[in-house]
Image (cartoon, helix red, strand yellow):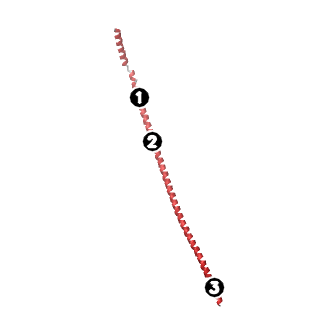
Amino acid sequence: MTKTIATLIAGLFATAAFAQTPAPAAAPVPAAKAEAKVVKAEAKETKEVAKADAKETKEVAKADAKEHKEVAKAEAKETKAAANAKEEVAGAKADAKVEKAKAHAKAEKSKEKAHAKEAKPADKSAAAPAATTVAAAAPAAK
């Protein structure tokens, strides 16, 4: 039994000696520092990714705004061109109406002239035989 007690006491001393060794306790400290560095690097990387995403989002928004502005400008240009085309068509129609009215007026004038010419020769032909009869009658009376 003394041997057993002596072995137990020696085991306790040995365990106590190994438990107080500072070397294994020093290893977790650098691991904590390394872990802190990893966490810090991950935070930095996350921050850079967020910054890059924000920059990309800003560029996309800027490009979209520019595209919308160009589309609006093109639509305004098309609308203006359509309005000008409608205005030109209206002007052409008005010009056509004026030309048509002038043509009708000219046709009426030429019709009136034609009727006047027709009426004049009829008057002359009726007047000419009467003049010849008077002229013919005058020599016979002598």
- Disc 3/disc 2 C-alpha distance (Å): 113 Å
Q: Nearer the viewer, mark 3 or mark 1?
A: 3
Quarter occupied by residue 111: bottom right
Three-letter residue code for mark 3: Thr
Is 79 placed above or below 118 here? above
Whether label 3 touches label 1, CB < 8 Å? no
Q: Quadrant of the C terminus?
A: bottom right
- Disc 3/disc 1 C-alpha distance (Å): 145 Å
Q: Which mark is residue 35?
A: 1
Q: Which residue is mark 2?
A: 57
Callout 2: SS: helix
Callout 1: SS: helix
Q: Nearer the viewer, mark 3 or mark 2?
A: 3
Three-letter residue code for mark 1: Glu
Residue 122 percent coordinates (x, y): 60, 78
* Dot placed on the residue nearer the N-terminal end, 3 or 1: 1
Q: Quadrant of the N terminus?
A: top left
Callout 3: SS: helix
Q: Which residue is mark 3?
A: 133
